[in-house]
Image (cartoon, helix red, strand yellow):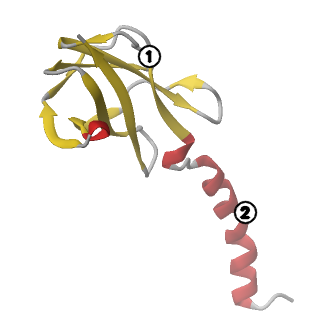
Amino acid sequence: MLVPSLRISVCILPIFLLCSEALAAGDDFRFELVSTDHRVGSAVVELRLTDLRTSIPVEGAIVFATRLDMEPDGMETMTSPVALLPAELPGHYRLASNLTMAGNWRLSIAAKVQGELETVTARIELEARP
């Protein structure tokens, strides 16, 4: 006969294992830069969000924080506003901004993938050319 506490543990363990496999961590997803030609002035930066476990693009993530600054060139206070644009391809996210000067820029982004607990974050560097 099983001890009552042991019986509960034996019943809960399989459920816990199934649930833990279903939930992904934030680092199971990656934002990657798709656009490569960024010029000074109005610019569209395109990113792809991929589930690294399946290599499938992730649609419908809720982007809730963005920041574009020149931290790679030592000017973190030099920022530019960012606006989210409609997606043209599944798993792609487009952001409009004004790259006010040539140099290296850092795009910081945070998003929630539906059904996942952790936030997906990325810091992506890009270069603005004259």
Residue displayed at 37% across by 31% down: 125
The residue at which mark 1 appears reads as 34
Image spot of residue 35 (x, y percent): 39, 13
Q: Residue furthest right?
A: 1
45 up-or-down from 21: above or below:
above
Q: Looking at the image, do the residues carrying marks 1 and 2 touch, with CB atoms under 8 Å apart? A: no
The location of residue 114, given as percent across then percent down, is 41, 38
Mark 1–mark 2 Cα distance, whole angstroms, equals 41 Å
Instruction: Between residue 38 and residue 27, name the one nearer to us.
Output: 38
| Amino acid bearing label 1 | Val
Disc marking residue 127: none
Q: Residue 64 appears in which quarter of the rendering?
A: top left
| Above or below, 12 relative to 96 | below
In the structure shown, which secondary structural element does the residue marked by tag 1 occupy? loop
Left of 49 or right of it: where is 67?
left
User: Which comes sooner in the sequence, label 1 or label 2?
Assistant: 2
